[in-house]
């Protein structure tokens, strides 16, 4: 079963990568972009076939390794 973990900086946490992207978009002539937040997507191919167990395992992986839960939030979606 495939799972996707979306990791984003929490609100209020500085995001220098997002700021750099925003500045670059402005320099390329894209007006009207108020804010950019940059995160990451991690795709997992899990052996688990039970959706509830797969989601629980992916959430546990995110808490323990994939996201720094002090400054990042995450969500898991099964594909």
Image: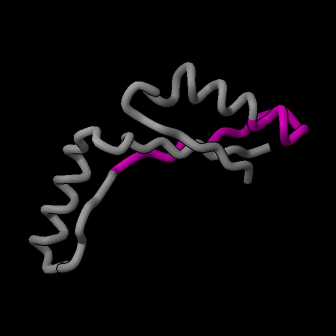
Quarter of the picture holding the N terminus? top right
Position of 16 with respect to 7 (left or right) is left
Q: Is residue 56 above or below residue 64?
A: below
Q: Quadrant of residue 36?
A: bottom left
Position of 4 with respect to 45 (left or right) is left
Place of residue 14 in the rendered image (x, y in percent of width and height, measured from the top left): 23, 40
Residue lying at the far left in this picture: please name it.
Answer: 27
Q: In this view, does 38 lie above or below 12?
A: below
Which residue is at 85% across, 42% downward? 51
In reply to whether residue 46 is colored magenta, the answer given is: yes
Which residue is at 24% across, 72% downward? 33
Place of residue 27 in the rendered image (x, y in percent of width and height, measured from the top left): 9, 71
Residue lying at the far front in this picture: please name it.
Answer: 12
Q: Is residue 62 above or below residue 45?
A: above
Please report the bounds of the magenta region as a residue range.
38-55
Which residue is at 53% across, 40% downward? 74
The one of 47 and 39 positioned closer to us in this rendering = 39
């Amino acid at each position: 079963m495939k799972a996707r973990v979306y990791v984003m900086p929490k609100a209020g946490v500085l995001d220098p990568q997002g700021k750099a992207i925003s500045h670059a978009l402005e320099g390329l002539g894209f007006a009207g972009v108020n804010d950019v937040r940059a995160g990451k997507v991690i795709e997992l191919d899990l052996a688990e076939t039970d959706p509830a167990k797969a989601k629980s395992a992916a959430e546990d992986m995110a808490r323990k390794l994939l996201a720094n839960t002090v400054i990042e939030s995450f969500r898991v979606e099964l594909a």
